[in-house]
Image: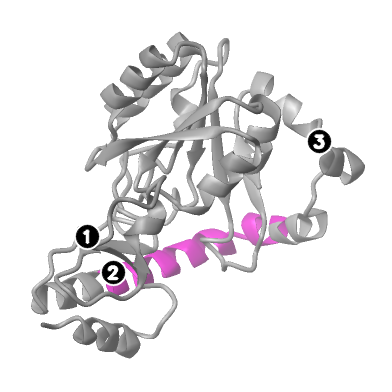
Amino acid sequence: MGTDIGCRIHCKHGDIAIVEEPTYFLAFTMIKDRGMSIKGVPIEEDGMDINAVEKICKENPGKIKMVYTVAVHHNPTGYTMSNAKREKLVALAKEHDFLIVSDEAYQLLNFTPSEVKPMFYHDDPENPHVLSVGTFSKLIGPGVKVGWIQAHEKLLKPLTNIGFVDSGNNPVIFSSCNLIDFIESGNLARHIEKVSKDLGGRCALVCKKLREVGLEPYEPKGGYFVWVKSKGKMTGRNGRDMSVNKDQFHDMMRLCFCWLPEEKLVEGIEYLRE
């Protein structure tokens, strides 16, 4: 919802958005729903290829209005954008006047101490270009549809000028109020600590088992997914859905280690054994 609201207010029909390839596949729908077109750029282990972003901006002067990035524990690759690249991206946004929508669903879900803060902290309050979008749905549970947008007032205030927001303010008032006590009591912090430890163990198990069956996964330091190239058999979600034109990553698998019990995770990986 935060990504969708940002598109509605700060972009228009005919604009161009840049995304990483691969990326969170439902972002394509949110962007296309606004009548925007999409261009993809590669992602590296330290994040989005900023040189490729700059090249597209120069080739399409004035038309790039949004860059969507999953900057931390990327979905699906697990990569995290370095602080150096974050600073370069913000500088590029100021130069070419585009909005950065930083999808930070996994910002607080770290298996080791994190070295990055939300993209918001790299932004210029006098000339802001960043919406950092967060959610409790990946921290507490997928049914907790409460999130937030962290941005400077110049970008944040216009987001209330949408009919369903103007009608009742926060669209999830009741759930938000319930969460206040959970946060202030310290229980959210304790919960995140417990969940991060559990999921970190699951991630390590999945990566270990994948190596045992002859695959070479990238082991993330947070988030929900392991990204790995197939050697024949496939399971999980196929990577082709995560490219703009569904023409790449056909041999890649996004494996979620959060839902199934450990014995089922091991069973699924054994299925992949040659």
Q: Earlier in the sequence, mark 3 or mark 1?
A: 3
Q: Residue 255: give its label.
A: none
Magenta stretch containing residue 134, yes or no?
A: no
Magenta stretch containing residue 188, yes or no?
A: yes
Location of mark 3 (residue): 162
Image side of residue 145 versus residue 172, left or right = left
Label 3 CA crowd tier, 10 Å (few <14, some 14–19, many 20+): few
Q: Residue 265: horizontal and vertical position, in percent?
A: 31, 82
The majority secondary structure of the magenta stretch comes to helix
Q: Amino acid at mark 2?
A: Cys
Image side of residue 259 versus residue 9, left or right = left
Q: Name the residue located 13 percent from the left edge and 70 percent from the top edge.
A: 215
Q: Residue 5: horizontal and vertical position, in percent?
A: 68, 38
Which of these two is toward me, 46 or 196?
46
Residue 224 at least partly seen? yes
Q: Residue 58: horizontal and vertical position, in percent?
A: 37, 12
Q: Name the residue located 60 percent from the left edge and 29 percent from the top edge.
A: 151
Image side of residue 42 versus residue 273, left or right = right
Q: Secondary structure at mark 3?
A: loop
Give the spatial CA distance, label 3 vs label 2: 40 Å
Which of these two is toward me, 53 or 154?
53
Q: Secondary structure at mark 2?
A: helix
Give the spatial CA distance, label 1 vs label 2: 7 Å
Label 2 CA crowd tier, 10 Å (few <14, some 14–19, many 20+): many
Location of mark 2 (residue): 203
Region rendered in magenta: 180-203
Q: Secondary structure at mark 1?
A: loop
- Label 3–label 2 contact, CB within 8 A: no
Q: Name the residue located 80 percent from the left edge and 50 percent from the top edge.
A: 171
Location of mark 1 (residue): 219
Give the spatial CA distance, label 3 vs label 1: 40 Å
- Label 1–label 2 contact, CB within 8 A: yes
